[in-house]
């Protein structure tokens, strides 16, 4: 797999959905030039979220985090592109919106860490794990964007 095919798992959290930010968030990744590989609108179970956030299970905010994340539907997505894990995190901003720069998603659209509207994988390894947790292989769509040669040098 070439560098241009790096993938990340992005998820618009229940507050992002409730606040009508789905289109705005997806637009930013589309406009950047990244490629959408999979997308679904789901009501996650607490069990899924406990798995998704397993690394944080010892943290005091874990129960509240799972409850918040299960409080409504989320938009689960896989996106692809050169350095997308790192760039995706930069587009999201810091975990705490208070530390996020204007121009980032969290910097522009939210205020508190417990309502930070969006998830993005923090490494290629966790991206692969998260993609496998949220999507079946056959849900990942293979297609060639028509603008590929205008986004990448080769
Ligand atoms: P990340 O989403 O930027 O990767 P993580 O440290 O992986 O940040 O935390 C996962 C999620 O847990 C955060 O996005 C946020 O929703 C929530 N969270 C993290 N720290 C706190 C906290 O101190 N209080 C409440 N929620 C938190
Ligand atoms: Mg994280």
Image (tube, rainbow, N blue to C red):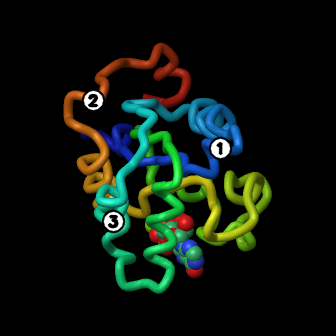
Sooner in the amino-acid sequence: mark 2 or mark 1: 1
The residue sitting at the left extreme is: 137
Name the residue carrying label 2: 139
Residue 104 located left or right of residue 71: right
Tags 2 and 1 in contact by the CB under 8 Å rule? Answer: no
Q: Secondary structure at mark 1?
A: helix
Asked if residue 87 can be seen in this view, the reply is: no
Name the residue carrying label 3: 50
CA gap, disc 3 and disc 1? 22 Å
Name the residue carrying label 1: 18
Residue 15 located left or right of residue 121: right
Q: Nearer the viewer, mark 2 or mark 1?
A: 1
Counting from the top left corner in percent of width and height, residue 20 is at: 69, 38
The response on whether ligand 2 sits within 8 Å of label 2 is no
Sooner in the amino-acid sequence: mark 3 or mark 1: 1
Q: Name which quarter of the figure residue 127 lies in.
A: bottom left
Q: Is residue 82 above or below residue 61?
A: above
Q: Residue at x 44, y 76 (%)?
A: 62
């Amino acid at each position: 797999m070439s560098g241009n095919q790096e993938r990340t798992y992005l998820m618009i959290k229940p507050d992002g959905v409730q606040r009508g930010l789905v289109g705005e968030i997806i637009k930013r990744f589309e406009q950047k030039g990244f490629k959408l590989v999979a997308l679904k609108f789901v009501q996650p179970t607490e069990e899924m979220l406990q798995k998704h956030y397993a690394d944080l299970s010892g943290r005091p905010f874990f129960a509240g985090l799972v409850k918040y994340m299960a409080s409504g539907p989320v938009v689960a997505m896989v996106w692809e592109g050169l350095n997308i894990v790192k760039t995706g995190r930069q587009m999201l901003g810091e975990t705490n919106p208070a530390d996020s720069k204007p121009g980032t998603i969290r910097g522009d659209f939210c205020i508190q860490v417990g309502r930070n509207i969006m998830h993005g994988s923090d490494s290629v390894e966790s991206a692969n794990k998260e993609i496998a947790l949220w999507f079946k292989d056959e849900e990942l769509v293979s297609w060639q964007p028509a603008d590929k040669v205008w986004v990448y040098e080769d």
